Amino acid sequence: MATAHKLNAELRDRAGKGAARAVRRAGRVPGVIYGNKQEPVLISVNPVDLMKEIQQPGFFSHVYEVQVGSDSYKVLARDLQVHPINDLPTHVDFMRFSAKTRLAVEVYVEFINEDTCPGLKEGGVLNVVRHEVELRCSPDSIPESLIADLAGLEIGDSVHISNITLPENVDLTITDRDFTIATIAAPTVYTEAEEGDEEAAEVGAESAEGGDDAEDGDDDEEKSED
């Protein structure tokens, strides 16, 4: 079961762009809690607290317990608006949910045992194909992350979704294929021999250009003699 992240908020009494601008001028971020067939609750949150949550992986897949005065709301973040220049949050939407709610969420993949992975120790590179995987589940069942174990993988091996254990009551939205999460790719090696070949090719090209110039010079001399 997902652990709810705590977030404090304050009530705001008016909706509209003017009211939202006033909240921002006061140094807070306007927001709203809606859904579950209940009246919306207009709130404002501390931008520092909100930024801490945004900067963590999985902001839109975490369950939040928003405390507004004496009331507490269990919600999911569903929309975030940011300033076009400084990327600071300007508005946030939270959605209430019930025990029957099931929705699609993106959950990030966490890779473990990189230090003991044979392929990586031999110089291979972890090529991540999917940083997140879309799941369908109830909000209370959203996992914090999906664990991809790299132990024992050699260069050329792959991690597929079938290699990851899903929590109970959690389903994939993609069910028609065993898609790839990551691969252990061979390292890209730039050898001295390759560098020598390139230099030789450049010298050859310059020599060819010099020959053309010499021939042109002979033609000029013949013309001047005429």
Image: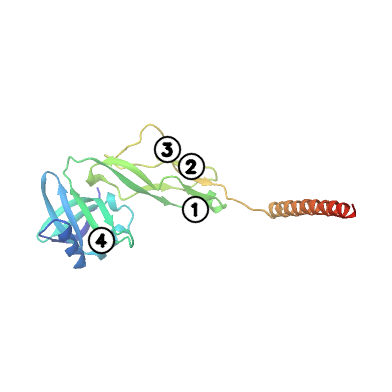
User: Which one is in front in this view, the residue at disc 4 or the one at disc 3?
Assistant: 4
Could you say whether the residue bearing mark 4 is in a helix, strand or loop?
A: helix
Res. 22 image quadrant: bottom left
What residue would you read off at disc 1? Answer: 116
**Discs 2/3, front:** 3
Q: Alpha-carbon neighbours of circle 2 within 10 Å: few (<14), some, or many (≥20)?
A: some
**Residue lying farthest top?**
176
How dense is the environment of label 3, judged by Cα within 10 Å: few (below 14), some, or many (20 and up)?
some
Residue to which mark 3 is pinned: 179
Residue lying at the far front of the rendered structure: 226
**Horizontal and vertical percent for residue 143?**
29, 47
Q: Earlier in the sequence, mark 1 or mark 3?
A: 1
Q: Can you say whether 133 is above or below 221 in the image? A: above
Q: CA distance from mark 4 to mark 1?
A: 36 Å
Taking depth in this image into account, of 34 and 221 the one nearest to the observer is 221
Measured in 3D between alpha carbons, the distance from the residue under mark 2 to the one under mark 1, in whole angstroms, is: 16 Å
Residue hosting label 2: 158
Front of the two marks 4 and 1: 4
Q: Nearer the viewer, residue 197 or 163?
A: 197
Q: Position of residue 129 (x, y in %)?
A: 45, 45
Which numbered marker is on residue 50? 4
Amino acid bearing label 4: Leu
N-terminal of the two: label 4 or label 1? 4
